[in-house]
Amino acid sequence: MSNIQNKSDVILIGAGVMSATLGSLLKELAPEWEIKVFEKLANAGEESTNEWNNAGTGHSALCELNYTSEKSDGSIDISKAIKINEQFQVSRQFWSYLVNSNLIRNPQDFIKPIPHMSLVQGEKNVTFLKKRFKALSNNPLFQGMEFSDDHEKLTEWIPLIMEGRTLNEPIAATKIDSGTDVNFGALTRMLFEHLKSKNVEINYKHSVEDIKRTSDGLWELKVWNMDTGNIERHTAKFVFIGGGGGSLPLLQKTGIPESKHIGGFPVSGLFMVCNNPEVVAQHHAKVYGKAKVGAPPMSVPHLDTRYIDNKKTLLFGPFAGFSPKFLKTGSNFDLIGSVKTNNVLTMLAAGVKEMALTKYLIQQVMLSNEKRMEELREFIPNAQSEDWGIVVAGQRVQVIKDTEAGGKGTLQFGTEVISAADGSIAALLGASPGASTAVHVMLEVLEKCFPQHFEEWESKIIEMIPSYGVSLVENPELFQEIYTSTAQTLGLSEKELVYS
Ligand SMILES: Cc1cc2nc3c(=O)[nH]c(=O)nc-3n(C[C@H](O)[C@H](O)[C@H](O)COP(=O)(O)OP(=O)(O)OC[C@H]3O[C@@H](n4cnc5c(N)ncnc54)[C@H](O)[C@@H]3O)c2cc1C
């Protein structure tokens, strides 16, 4: 059965953190607009956004070494670290606005303070870390960062990691207490509860099968109601494709010129999870190492204290791998189905260029549990196999496109907003730095798609995000003010929280 439903102003496809954020921004900026959400799963935040499917790092470049590269003259480029840190401050401000306005409650249920650390071994890496520390620690955004290559100090910071190491091994770490662990699943569920209370129609178990333009310039969605088996048709003036890994196939269905010559490369992930509470209790930090040669940036190994289901836990990984699925709940035909006549050359060029990466990912999939334990023992020398299990993480679909710098079929590791020239439809592709920068990225969607409203919206945006359009690194007083007030609102005091 098929019937045309009433048209709405906005349709959000997918109930992950991106749609949740865009819907929440729009409800403040244009409260009268009618918004509908279609999600094929039974609940919000079940794919990459779910707390077990990502690492829950509030990415602000405090510990991720891949955001600070070494230039050919040996100096450290911190521009990307500054950009990501500023973007995370945008998220902190919006979340604080929602808490202060009583639109969401109990921020401790989705964000907690946790020291962020970088850890390296070997003389060359220790020299790199020292230089990185010097470059960042004088910058207002990274104040409070400490460096140590002293075994005693490191044992105080990371006893579990230092136990069983020889004293002559060059090893060093930086530590900064202003890091966070973010439960993006919990945040997203809260945001959808808030949206529901504001009369946003949220349709779970509704899969969007097709998108096409109508003669009067609207977008019509063909939606499969998975409970009734009916096909429904819904129209909207604006559509956001927030389908995570499922965004690329939907974008391709729109047929807009901007959707052409783009491909997707899926990367799967695994975490090791510690199920021994005695071991969990001995560690309190997110500790990021250096990616192995040939490994993609998203597979940098890290040992993370996490707070999931009100319990402190320990995750190690992610181990990247190859799977042809675009979503964890996707199909083995996703990758092949995304190859179209307009992107086949781009995809083939990427296939040739990224042979080494494909080989690396296939090797990762083949790793035995004991091999994974060996990698874990580079962090925890005394780790015992019986203390650790495996959880399957979310899928990340990296964008492949033709770029001036990289040529045909270049693999991108960031996020990309693709929108129609008239701003009537936008999709988010890619997954890094990901959920941490959701507010910044969704503001980019609004800027691209609703430029005509920005004069009217600007004062509200500044009320919600006082640093909007301002460089925080160039305005350290404003940064300090924002940092202090958001820490207070979000309960980010620096002492350890006690969990049972
Ligand atoms: C292993 C791993 C580690 C990560 N670590 C971090 C981290 O530490 N910090 C960080 O900030 N980010 C991290 N990320 C990235 C982050 O998880 C993602 O950027 C973010 O969750 C993406 O949110 P989303 O809303 O775009 O997608 P998703 O959360 O995947 O949501 C998309 C939704 O769309 C639905 N959908 C798809 N197709 C359709 C359709 N046709 N019809 C209806 N519904 C549809 C899906 O079911 C899903 O619910 C990590 C990701 C992975 C995989």
Image (cartoon, grey):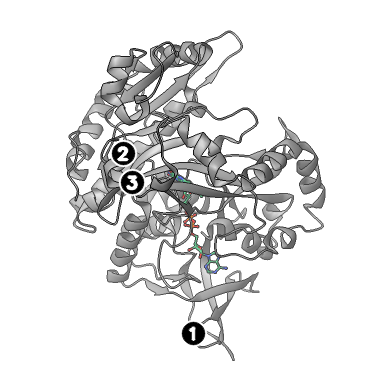
Q: Residues within 10 Å of mark 2 (few under 14, many from 20)?
A: many
Tell me the residue that label 3 is attached to. 182
* Residue drawn at 45 percent across, 49 percent down: 54
Where does the image place residue 47, in percent across and percent down from the top left? Answer: 48, 60
- As helix, strand or loop, the secondary structure at mark 2 comes to strand
Q: Which mark sits nearer the N-terminus, 3 or 1?
A: 3
Name above or below for residue 180 compared with residue 236. Answer: above
Name above or below for residue 63 compared with residue 385. Answer: above
- As helix, strand or loop, the secondary structure at mark 1 comes to loop
Tell me the residue that label 2 is attached to. 180
Q: Is residue 140 left or right of residue 3?
A: left
- As helix, strand or loop, the secondary structure at mark 3 comes to strand
Residue 227's disc is 1
* Some atom of ligand 1 lies within 8 Å of the CB belonging to the residue at label 3: yes
Mark 3 and mark 2 in contact (Cβ < 8 Å)? yes
Look at label 1 and name its amino acid: Asp
Look at label 3 and name its amino acid: Val
Where does the image place residue 109, in percent across and percent down from the top left? Answer: 24, 53
**Total label count?**
3
* Some atom of ligand 1 lies within 8 Å of the CB belonging to the residue at label 1: no
The Cα–Cα distance between marks 1 and 2, rounded to whole angstroms, is 39 Å
* Some atom of ligand 1 lies within 8 Å of the CB belonging to the residue at label 2: no
Q: Is residue 125 left or right of residue 87?
A: right
Name above or below for residue 428 compared with residue 278. Answer: below
Mark 2 and mark 1 in contact (Cβ < 8 Å)? no
Where does the image place residue 392, in percent across and percent down from the top left? Answer: 50, 54
The Cα–Cα distance between marks 2 and 3, rounded to whole angstroms, is 6 Å
Look at label 2 and name its amino acid: Thr
* Residue drawn at 36 percent across, 55 percent down: 25
In the rendered image, which quarter is residue 171 located in?
Answer: top left
